[in-house]
Image: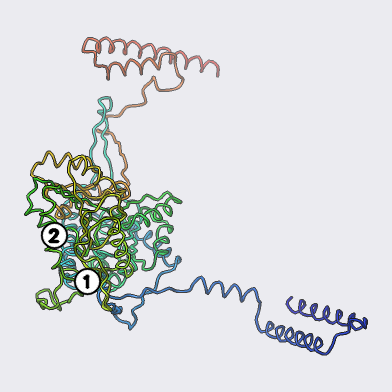
Amino acid sequence: MVGCVLLFLHYSLREKNQKRVLQPETQMDGKKSFVNFFTYCCFCILYFLLQKIPSLREFCQQHENDEKTTRRFIKSYDPATRQPLKVLGCQSDEIPSMTRQEVEERVKVAREEQKEWKKTTFEERTRVLQKVMDIMLERKHEIAVASCKDTGKTLLEAYLGEIIVSCEKIRFMINRGEHYLSPEKRSLPLMFLYKKAFVEYVPIGVIGIIVPFNYPYHTMLGPILTALFAGNTCIVKGSEWSAWSTIEIFESIFHQALIECGFTPDVVQFAMGFGDVGESVIRAGCDHIFFIGSPQTGRKIMQAAADSLTPVTLELGGKDPFIICDDADMNKVFGYATRSIFINNGQNCIAAERFFVQEKVYDRFVEHVVNEGKHVTMGPTYCTATEDEPIPEDKLFDCGAIVLPGSPARLEADIKEAVKHGAKLLVGGYVVKTELGNYLTPTILADCTPDMKIMQDEVFGPVMLISKWKTDEEVIKAADSTPYGLGCYVFTTNAKRGKKILDGVASGVACINEYGFFYLCVELPFGGVKVSGFGRFNGREGVRAFSNQRSFVVDRFSFLSMDVPSFMRYPVTSVDHRVVANAVELIYSSKGLIHKLKQGLKLVGTLLAASKQKKQLIEKQGQKK
């Protein structure tokens, strides 16, 4: 076909030239002849090349397919040192990002495996969880070091945020999981005493789990264990910013536990990659999506899940207020204050980013935290070979690095803007110019006001924001002025006053004279309101989140059953509705015993009348036949 086109062009050109020759006034000069000859040669060469290619269309299609399958790679490095992290067994620091087809295949495998996994007993599932605990305790230092290298945190933060909370979550699931997932008896109306009613917690299928970088091991462990214990399989998409530790350590822990307990590791699938891989997980047909991250990404998760009406659990960060009343125990306040904001370098969804201090104790509080903040150190974590090896003093730091490379500059700009609008910079506030890693000095800003941008947006960094207040009404309004609603903490010696303040601030977690330790109370559900998300993990609510809550009704005794009452059968009589009306009055009226007796007698009479009338109607229908 291509050859025909070329020949047509050739003869058309030749014919055109011949016509020009017949017209003396338009005779081509030598230069034009050369151009036409050159064009003809090019067409001939192109025609020859095309004979070597089966089809230009096939060539283009092949090129298009190659573009679609182009592999992207995640470059892993330690944010505290910017040194590349090489995957065990290979010399590359690049991890391949999965294609949509690969994700869909893994979800398909997980769905097939769920058909068998849902048949396992609670005893078998408990054995798997205990094995995860055993392996984790054997490798706890390895897990902590991997988290430090991948996210720049200190060893203390790794042991607190990755190890102890994970151990407590496993212990809770082993001790309470079966109780919360067993059929739960429910009461029935008096008229149905011959029946029994239950709520069953039935596995729903494949759980899609998408988790962030700040605590890469713990944030995936919780939903994985919940999914498995409820009889589901799962596919886990970790953050591209912490992909190395997932591939290097975390994935093997769950697979090793399953294999040693006699199960296939395919019940827990992993999907590594960028944001498009997360979207592929959602669109691959998962039955529930669990996500921890930002509100911006949370909205995208919901939009993708909405197409298939897939339910989602979203934990979307916070802007938690730390409220200090003038009657508070200041020694207790000082113990919690800096720790509550500089925890994991501020990269924590429950970090207390806003400090509201009543004017009477304001100066005292500011003086104390400034003196403490000036001495908070930061630097790369020295990862010891064993947990028993001490860290050299010259390599010991209070805070590590910030994971995202662009965050320090972004935070520095937000700090400058706040100062421009009246905030006072008392400590830090600038990017550390070093080739080592991603660092922002621990920062304290005083005299902040609720209308400042930095007081409305989640900082997710080591920045303490301090505001002064006079009345309880004022602080309630200021604390509740952001779109977030995760945690709220009030420090006061008057519990009644503290509860009143907490009740005025929308939050999913509320504490008086407490910060942080509540997260270890795994019996309590955890989650937020407003743009901090919805749904809960932990507690009985979290254990049941990955189940179909099915209502189940059965006969109390096999020999005692009841047919459909006569007045509800066809054909309908003129008094059937009166039976229902009399029954409602008898059961629900509050007019006293005598009234109920009268209604009872009336009900009997109506039932007899309905029965007689129905018999007559049935006989009449029989005669018509």
**Residue 150 drawn at (x, y percent):** 26, 72
Q: Which of 616 and 319 is in front in this view?
A: 319
Q: Residues within 10 Å of mark 1 (few under 14, many from 20)?
A: many
Q: How many marks?
A: 2
- Residue in the picture at 56% in, 72% down: 64
Q: Name the residue under label 2.
A: 369
SS for callout 2: helix
Q: Name the residue under label 1.
A: 148
Location of residue 480 (image quadrant): top left
* Residue type indicated by callout 2: Val
SS for callout 1: helix
- Left or right of 100? Residue 186 is left
Location of residue 369 (image quadrant): bottom left
- Residue in the picture at 85% in, 85% down: 28
Q: Is residue 118 visible?
A: no
**Residue 328 drawn at (x, y percent):** 9, 47
Location of residue 38 (image quadrant): bottom right
Q: Nearer the viewer, residue 123 or 439?
A: 439
Look at the image and tell me in which quarter the C terminus lies: top right
- Residue in the picture at 43% in, 50% down: 306
Q: How crowded is mark 2: few (under 14 residues within 10 Å), some or many (20 or more)?
A: some
Which of label 2 and label 1 is nearer to you? 2
Vertical relation: 31 (above or below) 12: below
**Residue 208 drawn at (x, y percent):** 35, 58
Q: Nearer the viewer, residue 595 or 446?
A: 446
Disc 2 or 1, which lies upstream in sequence?
Answer: 1
Q: How far apart are marks 2 and 1 (CA)?
A: 27 Å
**Residue 224 drawn at (x, y percent):** 27, 59
Report the colour scheme: rainbow
Q: Nearer the viewer, residue 277 or 427?
A: 427
